[in-house]
Amino acid sequence: MLKIQYFASVREAMARAEETIEPPETVRTVADLVSYLASEDAKFAEISSAGNPLLVAINHSVVDRDAELSANDEVAFFPPMTGG
């Protein structure tokens, strides 16, 4: 099982803060997970499109899309941070 968390504008767009999923065995990386979630949810597909960059963290550490997933990971999606 993976615990998926959505933060900030991603949470607002998804209309939920978190969910727990059991992805298929073919989901091994963050990129695989993004593709899987996009295929299951049109809103996530829109949010994760090329024009909408997302940051991803696994177990509280920001990772690249090629990062590998393990059972019971906590995966968080959030928009890029800006500062001033």
Image (cartoon, helix red, strand yellow):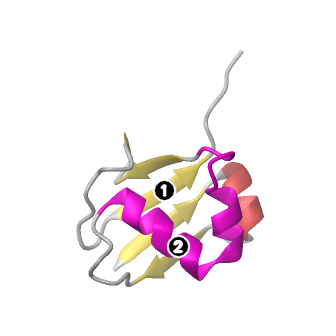
| Mark earlier in primary sequence (2, 1) | 2
Front residue of 58/32: it is 32
- Say how many tags the image has: 2
In this view, the residue farthest toward the front is: 50
Pointer 2 and pointer 1: residues touching (CB < 8 Å)?
A: no
* Left or right side of 18 for 43: right
Within the image, what quadrant is residue 12 found in? bottom right
Magenta residues, start to end: 29-53
Decide: is 20 above or below 32: below
Q: Element type at marker 1?
A: strand
Residue on which disc 2 sits: 37
Q: Quadrant of the C terminus?
A: top right
Front residue of 53/4: it is 53
Q: Residues within 10 Å of mark 2 (few under 14, many from 20)?
A: some
Question: Which amino acid, mark 1?
Answer: Ala
Does the segment drawn in magenta span residue 5? no
Residue on which disc 1 sits: 76
Does the segment drawn in magenta span residue 40? yes
* Left or right side of 83 for 75: left
Q: Which residue sits at x=29%, y=77%?
A: 26
Q: Quadrant of the N terminus?
A: bottom left
Q: Which residue sits at x=67%, y=21%?
A: 83
Residue 75 image offset from top left, x and y in percent? 42, 60
The image's mark for residue 66 is none
